[in-house]
Image (cartoon, helix red, strand yellow):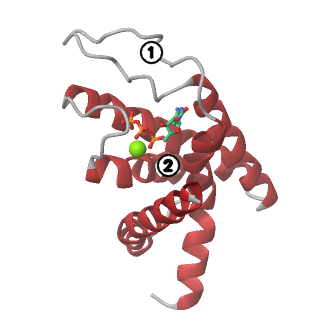
Amino acid sequence: MDLWSIILTIWYILPAYFANMAPVVFGGGSPIDKGRNWIDGKRVLGDHKTFRGLISGIVVGSVIGLIQLRPIQGVLLSTGAMTGDLVGSFIKRRLDIPPGGNAILLDHEGFLVFSILFCFWYDPLSAEQIIFLIIITPILYEMTNFIARKLNLK
Ligand code: CTP
Ligand code: MG
C-alpha cells in the first residue's frame, strides 16, 4: 500500500473516528435503554450509552463529512459507527462486562466494522484498505485514549 492510498483511507474513515470520540465530550444524561433489562435480567445497553452521546456522534461525524465534501459518507459512516458502538455495548452486557470495562475486539473494531458496512454500498473500500483500517484502528484508539488520560490527569 503506498502512502497516498494510506492517506486516502484515513481520510475516508475520519467521520467514523470523530463520531466515536464525540460522545466522550458531549455524552451523558438519560440512557438509551431507559434503565431497562434484557430478557437475561441484565441491562440492555447500560448507563454509558446515552441519547446525547448517540446524537452528538452522528452530528459531529456528519459535520466532518460536510467539511470533507463527502456528506453522504459522513452520515453513513457516523450512523454506522454509533450503531456498532451500541451493538458492542449490547454484547458486553450479555458477557457481564460492566459499562466502561474493556472488551478488546468490541471496543476497537465494533464501530469500525459497522461504519464500513453502512458506507460500503455507496462508496466501497478495497480489501486491502479494510485490512489496513482493522490493523491501524486499535493502535490509533489506544494512542488517543492514552493522550486523553494524560490530559485529564494534569
Ligand atoms: N457515551 C455516551 N453515549 C453513547 C456512547 C458513549 O454518552 N451513545 C459516553 C459515555 O460517557 C461513555 C463514553 O462516552 O462512558 C465512552 O464511550 P464508550 O467507550 O463507547 O463506552 P463505555 O464507557 O466503554 O461503555 P460500554 O461498556 O457500554 O461500551
Ligand atoms: Mg469504552
Residue type at mark 2? Ser
Q: CA distance from mark 2 to mark 1?
A: 22 Å
Closer to the observer: label 2 or label 1?
1
Say whether residue 15 is visible. Answer: yes
Mark identifier at residue 84: none
Quarter of the picture holding the N terminus: bottom left
Q: Position of residue 84 (x, y in %)?
A: 43, 40
Q: Tag 1: Cα neighbours inside 10 Å, few (<14), some, or many (≥20)? A: some
Q: Nearer the viewer, residue 105 or 73?
A: 105
Q: Regarding mark 2 in the picture, which secondary structure is present there?
A: helix
| Residue 145 horizontal side relative to residue 94, left or right | right
Identify the mark at residue 115; answer none if there is no mark. Answer: 2
Marked residue nearer the N-terminal end (2 or 1): 1
Answer with left or right where residue 119 lies relative to residue 137.
Answer: right
Residue annotated with mark 1 = 33
Q: Residue at x 48, y 28 (%)?
A: 49
**Residue at image point 59% right, 87% down:** 4
Q: Which amino acid is tagged 1? A: Asp
The answer to whether 2 appears left or right of 102 in the picture is right
Left or right relative to 127: residue 39:
left
Mark 1 falls on what kind of element? loop
The spot of residue 112 in percent (x, y) is: 44, 53
Q: Whole-percent x and y of residue 21?
A: 57, 50
